[in-house]
């Protein structure tokens, strides 16, 4: 899809024909994204999907802030990159071991690439929310985030959930105009994907589902 085509998508119809369970099973973290612009109407559509999430007392605490201006994206990207490289340093050291799992190495390399190219991602979507009794309402925000990720999958956008902004949350929230009662919760990079959606590797549900009481596994998941 070219940049012009990306801005001329039929927002009303795109994504409406993706079967629900197929969308759920093939939604995975897409970290390789094109720098091409995304139509604001399409960002509105995926955020609208977020508003149909459940929340306690139907309080709907979510706040969505889409950052698309280049200078503002660079401001976020510089802080994200610095925080991420500090965070990932121990894993990089551990990955020197010859028996380091290949799957973990691939995930780490993918996350590093995202951090190093974060300024190129066309949409930085910050999800924030009102507190209640002084506490964040994450139980109401993360269902909204999942709805957004599923909607991105449906319309063909790439996205992934990150929470690295917590490392510079106070600075970010003030910069965005959020008050102490509206803390940011997540930062979702969104753009047209450079990699396909497909079913991610998951352990069997039979390892997770228990009947009547919890049966302790022999070993915990890695």
Image (tube, rainbow, N blue to C red):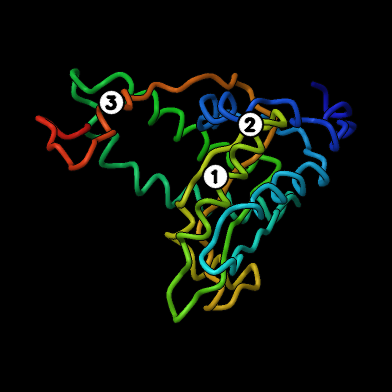
Q: In this view, does 120 lie above or below 193?
A: below
Foreground residue among 127 and 144: 144
Q: What element carries label 3?
A: helix
Q: Distance between the Cα atoms at labels 2 and 1?
A: 11 Å
Q: How far apart in space, not on screen, are marks 1 and 3 (Cα)?
A: 23 Å
Q: Which of the two discs, 2 and 3, sits closer to the camera?
A: 3
Determine the residue positioned at 65% across, 40% down: 190
Q: Which of 208 and 110 is in front in this view?
A: 208
**Vertically, is 68 above or below 132?**
above
Q: Considering only order in the chain, which callout, 3 or 1, is on the residue closer to the N terminus?
A: 1
Asked if residue 37 lies left or right of residue 94, the reply is right
Badge 2 or badge 1: first in the primary sequence = 1
Query: What label does residue 146 carry, if any?
Result: 1
Quarter of the rendering containing residue 130: bottom right
Q: x, y percentage for residue 31?
A: 54, 32
Disc nearest the viewer among 1 and 3: 3
Q: Given contact means CB atoms under 8 Å apart, are the residues at marks 1 and 3 in contact?
A: no
The secondary element bearing badge 1 is classed as: helix
Q: Quadrant of the C terminus?
A: top left
Residue closest to the far bottom: 133
**Residue visible at 17% across and 41% down?**
214
Residue holding disc 3:
206
Instruction: Identify which residue, 91 or 31, lies in the foreground.
Output: 31
Does label 2 or label 3 sit earlier along the sequence? 2
Disc 3 packing (10 Å; few <14; some 14–19; many ≥20): few
Relative horizontal placement of residue 116, taking residue 45 as reference (left or right)? left
Q: Which residue is tagged 2? A: 153
Q: What element carries label 2?
A: helix
At horizontal 51% and vertical 26% (from top left) the residue drawn is 25
Quadrant location of the N terminus? top right
Q: In this view, does 138 lie to the left or right of 120?
A: left
């Amino acid at each position: 899809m070219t940049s012009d085509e990306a801005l001329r998508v039929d927002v009303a119809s795109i994504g409406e024909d993706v079967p629900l369970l197929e969308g759920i099973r093939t939604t995975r973290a897409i970290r390789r994204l094109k720098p091409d612009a995304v139509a604001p109407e399409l960002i509105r559509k995926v955020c609208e999907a977020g508003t149909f999430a459940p929340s306690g007392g139907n309080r709907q605490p979510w706040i969505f802030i889409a950052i698309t201006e280049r200078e503002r994206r660079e401001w976020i990207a510089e802080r994200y990159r610095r925080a991420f490289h500090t965070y990932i340093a121990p894993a990089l050291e551990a990955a020197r071991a010859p028996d380091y799992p290949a799957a973990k190495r691939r995930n780490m390399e993918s996350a590093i690439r995202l951090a190093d190219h974060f300024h190129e991602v066309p949409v930085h979507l910050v999800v924030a929310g009102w507190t209640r009794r002084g506490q964040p309402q994450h139980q109401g925000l993360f269902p909204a985030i999942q709805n957004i990720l599923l909607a991105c999958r449906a319309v063909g956008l790439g996205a992934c959930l990150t929470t690295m902004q917590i490392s510079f949350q106070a600075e970010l929230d003030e910069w965005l105009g959020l008050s102490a009662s509206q803390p940011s919760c997540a930062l979702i990079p969104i753009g047209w994907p450079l990699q396909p959606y497909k079913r991610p590797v998951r352990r069997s549900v039979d390892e997770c589902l228990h009947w009547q009481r919890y049966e302790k596994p022999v070993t915990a998941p890695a």
